Image (cartoon, rainbow, N blue to C red):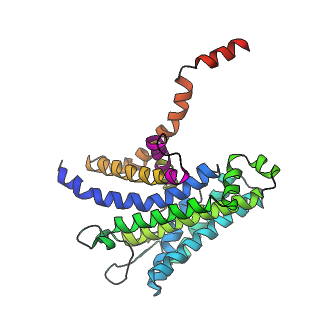
Amino acid sequence: MDIMALVNALPGAVAQGLIWAIMAIGVYITYRVLDIADLTVDGTLCTGGAVCVVCMLAGWNVWASILAATCAGLLAGFVTGIFHTFMGIQPILAGILTQLALWSVNLKIMGKANQAINVDKYDLLVSLRYIKDVPFYQNTIFVVAIVIAVLIALLYWFFGTELGCGIRATGCNANMARAQGINTNLNKVIGLMVSNGLVALSGALLAQYQGFADINMGRGSIVIGLAAVIIGEALLSRVFHNFALKLLSVAVGSIVYYLVYQVVIWCKVDTDLLKAFSAVVVAIFLAVPYWKRRFTKPTVAAKGGEKNA
């Protein structure tokens, strides 16, 4: 196996990891902050890519196209939120329903199963071609890293406001939050909107990076997002306690995931097994906290408590 082939592939893996990190941060907001397993993201990622590509093909500026894609994600999150809060549908089922509807919506947006965009004809913000032999300010890794830094700063500020703290309180204990006069339904809708807006932004950048939007590009994205969240927490939870640093750990987890993914490909593992590999990785990291609780010996204080009982 050629080690240089792996070395040459690593910058691309880092760039992909950073782009997917934005999606993973969106997953973190629902999974950890709101305590909701939102499956809308599998459809929203494609929606963001589809809207961005179609807008650019229609002559829109790249920034306006990205903004339109993000707004489409916000709308998808709003629909899931309405399904859950106004219609009383369980959050996981509400996400599945929105995801299912987005399949048809994405096909209508693109007009077909995939839509390509040429980096030579359009001024893209990021691209696979912008990894090497370009000025540093145009390098995809640098550009996406700056975007993530700005997003983390904005999210840190937002979740420190009264509304943001209300969303975090809703995720921690919805009953207690309602007792304190917090509108938990509104907070859930806003949290789902923010999450899916970030996922759609990630989809817009991913479509530019790979040069096309495809109807299947979001399939399994929830697994990648969870992998990034769990890996980041496993590696840095003891170091990063600040909320902004926790978001940064998610980005680190996404990069680590794609670096490992690249190594697996370099080892010539059957590509048909890569999705299974992702599922196994997530399952193992999700099981670690349970294994720790189950197999760690109880403390002396705990034993004393049991005797007194």
Location of residue 132 by image quarter: bottom left
Whether residue 48 is visible to the viewer of this picture, yes or no, is yes
- Determine the residue positioned at 43% across, 47% down: 278
Q: What are the residue bounds of the magenta stretch?
A: 228-247
Q: Quadrant of the C terminus?
A: top right
Q: Is residue 306 magenta?
A: no
- Determine the residue positioned at 73% across, 63% down: 82
For this rendering, which residue is in front, 248 or 186?
Answer: 248
Percent x, y of residue 95: 64, 58
| Picture layout, residue 250 above or below residue 216 | above
| Picture layout, residue 87 above or below residue 68 | above
Q: Is 179 on the left or on the right of 96, as rendered?
A: right
Residue extending farthest bottom: 59
For this rendering, which residue is in front, 228 or 135?
Answer: 135
Percent x, y of residue 102: 59, 67
Percent x, y of residue 52: 48, 76
The majority secondary structure of the magenta stretch comes to helix
Whether residue 215 is visible to the viewer of this picture, yes or no, is no
Percent x, y of residue 299: 58, 19
- Determine the residue positioned at 50% across, 56% down: 24
Residue extending farthest top: 307
| Picture layout, residue 299 above or below residue 60 | above
- Determine the residue positioned at 53% across, 76% down: 67
